[in-house]
Image: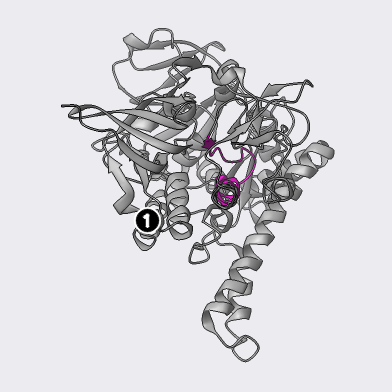
Amino acid sequence: MTTPVEQVDVLIVGAGLSGIGAAAQLGANFPDRKIVVLESRQTNGGTWDLFKYPGIRSDSDMFTFGYKWDPWPGEQALADGRHILSYLRKVADKWNVDEKIRYGHKVVSADWSSADKRWTVTAETADGLTTIATRFLWSCAGYYDYDHGHEPEFPGRAKFKGEFVFPQFWPEDLDYAGKNVVVIGSGATAVTLIPNMADEVGHITMLQRTPTYILSRPGKDLVAVGIGSTVGKLPKMVPFRNLRERAGFEAVRWANVMLQISTFSLARTQPDTVKKIIREGIIRSLTGLREKYMTRDEAIEIVEAHFTPPYQPWDQRLCFVPDGDLFKAIRTGKASVVTDRIRTFVADGIELESGDKLPADIVIAATGLKIKLFGGVQLHIDGKPVAASDTLAYKGLALSGIPNLLFTIGYTNASWTLKADLVIDYAVKLLKHMDKKGYEQFLVERDYDGEVRPLMDMQSGYLQRAAAEMPRAGDRAPWGLKQNYLVDVKTITGSVVDRPLTFA
C-alpha cells in the first residue's frame, strides 16, 4: 500500500535568517496554513551557526540586519556571531518557528505539476528520501555552498608541513598561540580574523593579491546611543514604553538605511571623493592622534602599498571594521599586510613571486565562498529540468516561467535583512490576494527583451565565478535590481497586480 504524500501550504527551504523570518511572518498572518521549514543541518541559524572562526560578526549594522518586526536590542553596531545566533533563536522561539522546522532534511529537487498546481519536493534524510507536496515553494537557502568553500589550486600546497585551515570549517582545537599565521585573502573574513587573532599569535600576516576598500565605523551605533538617551527622557510625550522604544528603533533603523544608501550612491557618483574619505580614515587609524603610533608618511606608505584598490569603491563589497580594530593590530606590529602573489608553498611557509618568503605555522585560506543558488535544489516543471540561468528575476524575488516559487537573496551593498523583510511583505500580500480571488497559481511571464546581466552584478570574485549559473536581471523595473532599498520599497511593496504577473 502506497503511503500518501504529505500536503502542505507553504514549504520553506532553509532555517537561517531568511527562513526564520519567512516562517515567523507567514505563521502570524496565516495561522491556519500548514507551513513547513526543511533544514539540511541539525540546527537553525544558518550562516551564524555554521561559521565558528574567531571574531565572526556582521559586516552590516544590526539595526538594519535585525528584523524590522522584531528589533535588534542594544546599541552594538556590528555584533558578533554568538549574539546574532542568540537573537535569531530567540526570534524563532518567540514566533513559534521551531515547531515548523524539520531538521536533517536536505532538499534535492522540486517538480511542479501544471495539472495539480503543486510542487513535489524531494529531500534526503537519515532514513532515505522523503517527498512533500506544497502549493508554494520559498527558497531561503541563500546563495553559497554550506559544504564547500572556494578552494583555489595553491602550487606546492602538499609540501606545507603546518596546518591549513578554511574559515568555513574552523577546527575547534586549533592552537595558534605564539604561532606565525598567514591569512590568504582580504575580504570580510580576513579583516575579521586578523584583529581577533593578533593578541595571541606570534605574528599574523594578511596576504592579498589585490587590496580591498576598508572603512572603520564605531562599534556602538552613535545614533542609537543618542536616541536611546533622548527617548528614555520622554515618558510624558510618549507615555507607553513599547511605543517609545519602537519610535527609537525606527529612527535608528532609518538613519542607518539612509547612511547605507547615501554611501553607496556617493561611491557611484563621486568615487574619488569616497576614495579620499576612506584613505584619510585609514591614515588616521594608523597614526593615532598627533601621530602617536607612526608618522603620517609611514601611514601613507602602508596605505598606498596595501589599501589602494585598482577598482572603484563598491565595484566589490566594502569591508567595515569596528573601531578600526584591524588598523590597531597593524600599528602594534602584531599584524602586517603583504600584497603579492604566491609562487609556491614550502615546508615552513609561502614563497612569493617577489622573492620574499612568509614563514608560517598555520595558513588560513580566507579565499571566499562557493556559490550554490537555492541550496542546489534541482527545479523541474512537469518533469523537465529548468536552469536558473535561463530565467529572468522578477523584483528580485521570483523567476520568469516558474510558478508559485519565491526566493530570498539579500542585498550585496547593504544589510541582507532589508531585502528579506521586503520579500516577506510581498509574500504575505501575494498570498492574501490569491486567497481573496480564489487563485491557486501565480506565474511571472517574461515580457522583457532588453539588456540582461547576472542577478548579483558585482566584481567580487565569488560572484564572477558563478555568474553564468545565475538567473538574469534586466535594466528596468520590475526586472532590474537596483540594490537600493528605497527603490525596492516602492517597487516591491506596491500592488501585487502587475503586468508580468498572471494568476490562475
Q: Is residue 191 left or right of residue 433?
A: left
Q: Residue at x 58, y 46 (%)?
A: 423
**Residue nearest the viewer, comparing 212 with 20:** 20
Instruction: Quickly name the residue at label 1.
Output: 92
Q: Residue at x 40, y 12 (%)?
A: 345
Q: Nearer the viewer, residue 65 or 175?
A: 65
What residue appears at the point 73 percent right and 33 percent down from the top-left corner? 480
Report the magenta residues as a range: 404-425
Q: Is residue 216 visible?
A: yes
Mark 1 closeness class: few <14, some 14–19, many ≥20 residues within 10 Å = many
Disc 1 residue type (three-letter): Ala
What is the quadrant of residue 38 in the picture? Answer: top left
* Relative to 274, 45 lies left or right: left
The vertical placement of 281 against 315, above or below, is below
Is residue 293 shown in magenta?
no
Residue that sits furthest to the bottom in the current view:
236
- Name the residue at 76% across, 49% down: 262
